């Protein structure tokens, strides 16, 4: 029902706009009307010359005022119909076409609706008059039935007119699709899909390593341990098994660290704060962690953790410092993660692919990666990510 009343209101305001437009157009059209009347009533040579001059004046006014009036009408109609501003500009001819349709097509349609509406509105008065003048019951009932039947007709015509008007306005006055912008949107979506597919593949690899490779390696080390118990101590075979057992344990530790780096279980189950604290506990650096509690969008948490992990690994490898600080704050729908160390600075992202890959992942997630590392330090890596859930 609300939609019907909105359509009726839009129809009424369109009628007012068309009426106002006709008032404005009366200025350039008045000389043309006078010329037509002169030729019709007094077709003399003098009057023909005067009519020709008046016609030229009218045509000149229309040529001069037409495009400007059409542009003004387009601006007002976009505001009235709540259409987005056209970018790029759809062209004056589209605004002129819309203005002509509003001038030529709208009045007849609105006239039919106005006539039907007048019959509906006048129904109570007409029925009362017929009753007061003792008309036949058939006349009273017929007039009442006509008014009642015309109510849904008027509302239906208003809905059809409003829908058609909105479609024409969007087509002629709405924003045209920008091919470059459309390609950019598609590239952005494609990059986001690739990042999602990459994260899904990383999780699959993590599950395979954890559930298959790691479990088989555990079983292998247990069998080596049992086999060692059956050999005499100090024998060459026992020493070989001991060496194999130690290598198996070392490989298990490396595989465990690899799995943790690919897709940390703590990150998935407990969130960013717990995962960063776990990362800091296993780091050779003294790390101050100040991460806001709470969960964020999975994509944002993954990228944020990857940034912290990469930054701390670089700090431990290249920076001559034993301390780093990790901070994460949420402001509205933006998650900001910052890693800072007091090393000598001078970090160059172009010397490795880690930070470049992180920047690409942050961009694919709708965020950005910033880095400051002047000579003498400090080095600050900052990641800003949308985190609306």
Image: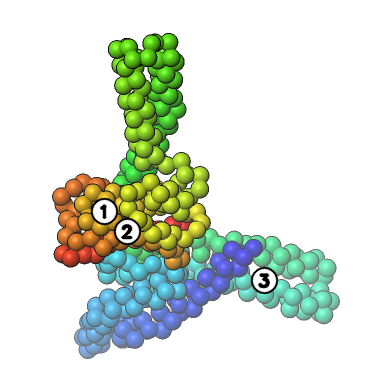
Residue ranking furthest to the front: 234
N-terminal-most mark, 3 or 1: 3
Q: Quadrant of residue 134?
A: bottom right
Q: Nearer the viewer, residue 363 or 143?
A: 363
Depicted 244 relative to depicted 49: above or below = above
Depicted 300 relative to depicted 290: above or below = above
Residue at x 54%, y 74% (from the top left corner): 12
Q: Nearer the viewer, residue 343 or 162?
A: 343
Q: Position of residue 257 (x, y in %)?
A: 36, 38
Circle 3 or circle 1, nearest the eye: 1
- Mark yes or no: residue 225 visible: yes
Q: Position of residue 384 (x, y in %)?
A: 35, 60
CA neighbours of label 3 inside 10 A, class few (<14), some (14 to 19), many (20+): many
Q: Quadrant of residue 342?
A: bottom left
Q: Nearer the viewer, residue 201 or 145?
A: 201
* Mark pair 3, 1: CA separation: 81 Å
Circle 3 or circle 2, nearest the eye: 2
Residue at x 30%, y 61% (from the top left corner): 340
Residue at x 31%, y 17% (from the top left corner): 239
**Labelled pair 1, 2 in contact (Cβ < 8 Å):** yes
Q: Position of residue 111 (x, y in %)?
A: 52, 71
Q: How is the image coloured?
A: rainbow
On the image, numbered disc 1 is attached to which residue?
315
- Circle number at residue 120: 3
On the image, numbered disc 2 is attached to which residue?
324
> In what element is the residue under mark 1?
helix
Task: Tell whether 104 sits left or right of 179.
Answer: right
* Mark pair 3, 2: CA separation: 79 Å
Q: Quadrant of residue 166?
A: bottom left
> In what element is the residue under mark 2?
strand
* Mark pair 1, 2: CA separation: 8 Å
């Amino acid at each position: 029902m609300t939609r019907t009343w909105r359509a009726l209101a839009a129809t009424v305001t369109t009628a007012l706009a068309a009426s106002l437009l006709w008032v404005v157009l009366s200025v350039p059209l008045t000389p043309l009307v006078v010329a037509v009347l002169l030729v019709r009533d007094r077709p003399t040579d003098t009057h023909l010359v005067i009519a020709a001059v008046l016609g030229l004046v009218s045509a000149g006014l229309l040529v001069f005022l037409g495009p400007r009036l059409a542009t003004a009408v387009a601006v007002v109609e976009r505001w009235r119909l709540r259409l987005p501003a056209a970018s790029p500009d759809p062209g004056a001819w589209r605004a002129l076409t819309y203005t002509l349709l509003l001038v030529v097509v709208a009045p007849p349609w609105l006239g039919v609706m106005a006539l039907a509406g007048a019959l509906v509105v006048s129904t109570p008065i007409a029925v009362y008059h017929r009753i007061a003048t003792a008309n036949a019951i058939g006349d009273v009932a017929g007039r009442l039935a006509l008014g009642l039947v015309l109510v849904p007709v008027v509302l239906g015509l208003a809905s059809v007119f409003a829908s058609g008007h909105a479609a024409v306005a969007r087509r002629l006055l709405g924003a045209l699709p920008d091919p470059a912008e459309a390609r950019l949107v598609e590239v952005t979506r494609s990059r986001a899909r690739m990042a999602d597919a990459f994260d899904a593949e990383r999780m699959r690899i993590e599950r395979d390593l954890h559930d298959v490779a790691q479990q088989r390696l555990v079983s292998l080390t247990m069998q080596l341990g049992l086999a060692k118990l059956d050999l005499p101590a100090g024998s060459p075979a026992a020493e070989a098994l001991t060496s194999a057992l130690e290598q198996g344990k070392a490989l298990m530790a490396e595989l465990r660290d690899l799995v943790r780096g690919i897709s940390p279980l703590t990150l998935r189950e407990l969130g960013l704060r717990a995962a960063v604290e776990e990362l800091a506990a296993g780091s050779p650096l003294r790390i101050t962690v100040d991460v806001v509690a709470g969960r964020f969008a999975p994509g944002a948490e993954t990228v944020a953790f990857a940034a912290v992990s990469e930054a701390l690994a670089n700090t431990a490898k290249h920076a001559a410092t034993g301390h780093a600080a990790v901070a994460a704050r949420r402001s509205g729908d933006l998650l900001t993660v910052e890693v800072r160390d007091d090393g000598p600075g001078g970090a160059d992202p172009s010397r490795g692919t880690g930070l470049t890959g992180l920047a690409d992942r942050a961009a694919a997630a709708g965020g950005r990666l910033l880095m400051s590392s002047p000579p003498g330090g400090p080095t600050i890596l900052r990641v800003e990510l949308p985190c609306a859930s």
